[in-house]
Image (cartoon, grey):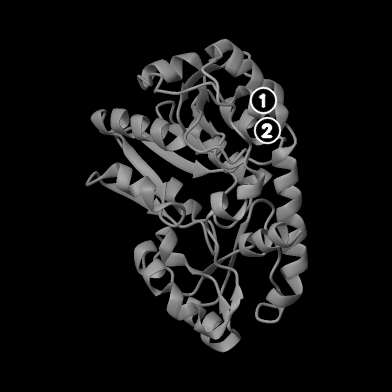
Amino acid sequence: MNYQEYRAAKEAFLQTDPLRLDCMNTQKALSGLVPAIPQTTEEYSLPEALAAWQEVTGFDLQQLESIPGTGVRELLAQLIEQLKQAEAEFLFPCDVYPVYHRLLGDYPARTYHTFPDWEWEVLSATSEQRQVLLLTQPAVPVGRYLSAAEITTVQNWLAADARRLLIVDAAYAYEPNHSIYAKLLASNQCLCLFSLSKPWLLPEHWGLAVGPTELLESVSLSPGEFSTNWVPALLQNTGLPARLRNLFHQEWKRLSAAIHEFVPDWEPPESGYYATVNLPFEQLLQNHNVLGVPATVFGSDRSDVTVISCLFHIQRGLTDG
């Protein structure tokens, strides 16, 4: 079941008034928290926008180059096209974001799973082509960061071949601790893609590719179209990512008892509003009257895992409050 099929069947799924763990729309669920963009023609310069982003995120861009765009998707699309022209070999997750593979088109890629377990075996194969690994950090929908051992695994993989490239999709980076990105960027073989879309609920306003100067030049990444009218909203809402983190944490804590009724050993995610449970979607709905999201909606081929979200209950709490 893909996303369109799932949406078409949603009304039927709701007939039994299930526990709603299905919401995927942050703009709808968190609409009351979306910062207002001033209605002004004033634009800020790129250095001013970069300074504001650094100030609010705490990310140090010294010794690094940055290329702006409208968001992660636009920057990633440009990277993929450049690397396809260079006949790179892509190592992409198959269960995170179907758009990744739509951007590839008919170009082949080696895929790996991120749940129920991360398939690091994908890194064992060598290639005469330049290998490009795409990671989502924090990982979605499992909602976790790489462990120290996993970071070392990725670092060792990069060190084994100077041509290898790591692309990190950091769109879901709600946390202020950027140490994991700094460690990966230190390899000089990593590009990190950031956005205002999730932490500040401002999609298609600003994205940033960050990496070593020579590496960005080697992939011929150029600035996309972007605006800087979001700068005042960012500076006036510096605490929004922290508020969102707290909302997610508190809602998962509140939902834990209900989730433990059908998955006793479930643990809440480290980050974000998504998590996974190792039960089939149909079983969850029919046996427990809980509506989640089939893992196939995220591109997975696993029918024994369901993605769950805390957004619906956060939305209801914000509305009632």
Is residue 269 depicted above or below 61 in this figure? below
Q: Which residue is mark 2?
A: 178
Front position in the image: 127 or 311 = 311
Disc 2 marks which amino acid? His
Q: Is residue 242 left or right of residue 54?
A: right
Tell me where residue 116 sits by quadrant.
bottom right
- Mark 1 neighbour class, 10 Å CA radius: few under 14, some 14 to 19, many 20 or more: some
Front position in the image: 288 or 128 = 288
Picture quarter with the C terminus: bottom right
Q: Position of residue 296 (x, y in %)?
A: 41, 65
Q: Is residue 285 left or right of residue 263?
A: left
Q: Position of residue 316 (x, y in %)?
A: 67, 63
Where disc 1 sits, the SS reads: loop
Q: Position of residue 74 (x, y in %)?
A: 39, 33
Q: Are marks 1 and 2 in contact (CB under 8 Å)?
A: yes
Tell me how many marks there are: 2
Tell me where residue 55 sits by quadrant.
top right
Q: Which residue is mark 1?
A: 59
Picture quarter with the N terminus: bottom left
